[in-house]
């Protein structure tokens, strides 16, 4: 009988997934980081969107110590987290046709910007339409999704397509359909999701690439520092003022 605990098994599974994206998604990560750097250098703005738990990874790169100050959260009421009541409303809204167009029309997104869309399944109407509509506006789209869903599920968008079909670049998280890494004979359902760990790591790898790429070009990356270290607030005040016209979370 194995003495490996469920915690051991989950952490091993997460480590395996992280190694996979390191090895198999290196080219896509490099391309996505270069696209962010191109956008920053070209005067564009950066946005990230995710619905429900996918929003966690989006929020992780917004107003973040060590992150790019220009990354803004594109929000849709009722979908930013599980604080909406009932929590199931967010899941329902993600399947509503036409909502993405309304959101984008009310957003500051414009041609020359880059939008990161995070959707584990990539099958719901909102992320699919958001990618389609954003590209129509001249916005570059980076999709972060599990490509496996397209082969094992049906699309919930009228076009029959998935998020991955409407992106300039796709980052494949490699998460298995169902997002649960563990099973036990004594537990009736699979459990222990790893998508947040993996997706957040993917995006931080992209941001790290963007920062280094900008530096290699002789451009100071607009990075934020922790407000809990001496001088952090002063540093951030300078960055936020310098790039204030491209930052939307401080107004």
Image (tube, helix red, strand yellow):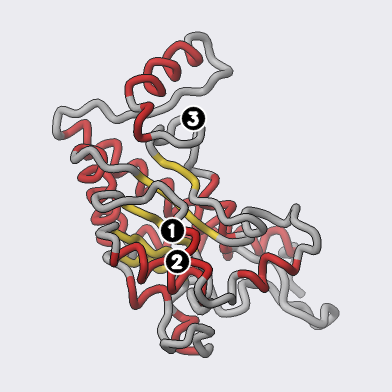
Classify 183 as above or below 76: below
Q: Residues within 10 Å of mark 2 (few under 14, many from 20)?
A: some
The residue pinned by badge 3 equals: 65
Extreme residue in the left direction: 217
Q: Residues within 10 Å of mark 3 (few under 14, many from 20)?
A: some
* Residue at 75% from the left image edge and 52% from the top image edge: 83
Location of residue 130 by image quarter: bottom left
- Residue 144 at x, y = what percent? 43, 63
* Residue at 23% from the left image edge and 38% from the top image edge: 43
* Residue at 45% from the left image edge and 66% from the top image edge: 101
Which is nearer the eye, 240 or 222? Answer: 240
Of the numbered discs 3 and 1, the one sitting upstream in the chain is 3
- Residue 185 at x, y = what percent? 80, 83
Question: Alpha carbon of mark 2 to alpha carbon of mark 1: how far?
Answer: 5 Å
**Badges 2 and 1: C-beta atoms under 8 Å apart?**
yes
**Badges 3 and 2: C-beta atoms under 8 Å apart?**
no
Question: Alpha carbon of mark 3 to alpha carbon of mark 1: how far?
Answer: 27 Å
């Amino acid at each position: 009988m194995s003495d490996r605990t469920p915690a051991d098994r989950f952490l091993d599974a997460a480590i395996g997934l992280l190694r996979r994206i390191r090895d198999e998604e290196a080219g896509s990560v490099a391309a996505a980081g270069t696209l962010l750097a191109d956008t920053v250098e070209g005067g564009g703005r950066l946005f990230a969107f995710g619905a429900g738990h996918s929003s966690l990874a989006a929020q992780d790169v917004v107003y973040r110590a060590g992150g790019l100050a220009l990354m803004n959260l594109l929000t849709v009421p009722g979908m930013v987290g599980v604080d909406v009541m009932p929590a199931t409303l967010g899941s329902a809204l993600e399947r509503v046709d036409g909502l993405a167009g309304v959101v984008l029309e009310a957003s500051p997104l414009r041609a020359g910007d880059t939008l990161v869309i995070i959707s584990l399944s990539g099958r719901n109407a909102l992320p699919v339409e958001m990618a389609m509509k954003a590209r129509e506006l001249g916005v570059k789209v980076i999709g972060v999704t599990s490509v496996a869903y397209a082969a094992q599920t049906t699309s919930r968008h009228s076009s029959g397509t998935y998020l991955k079909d409407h992106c300039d670049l796709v980052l494949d998280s490699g998460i298995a359909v169902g997002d649960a890494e563990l099973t036990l004979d004594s537990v009736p359902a699979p459990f222990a999701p790893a998508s947040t760990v993996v997706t957040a790591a993917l995006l931080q790898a992209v941001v790290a690439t963007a920062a280094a790429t900008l530096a290699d070009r002789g451009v100071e990356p607009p990075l934020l520092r922790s407000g809990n270290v001496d001088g952090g607030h002063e540093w951030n005040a300078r960055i936020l003022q310098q790039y204030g016209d491209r930052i939307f979370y401080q107004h």
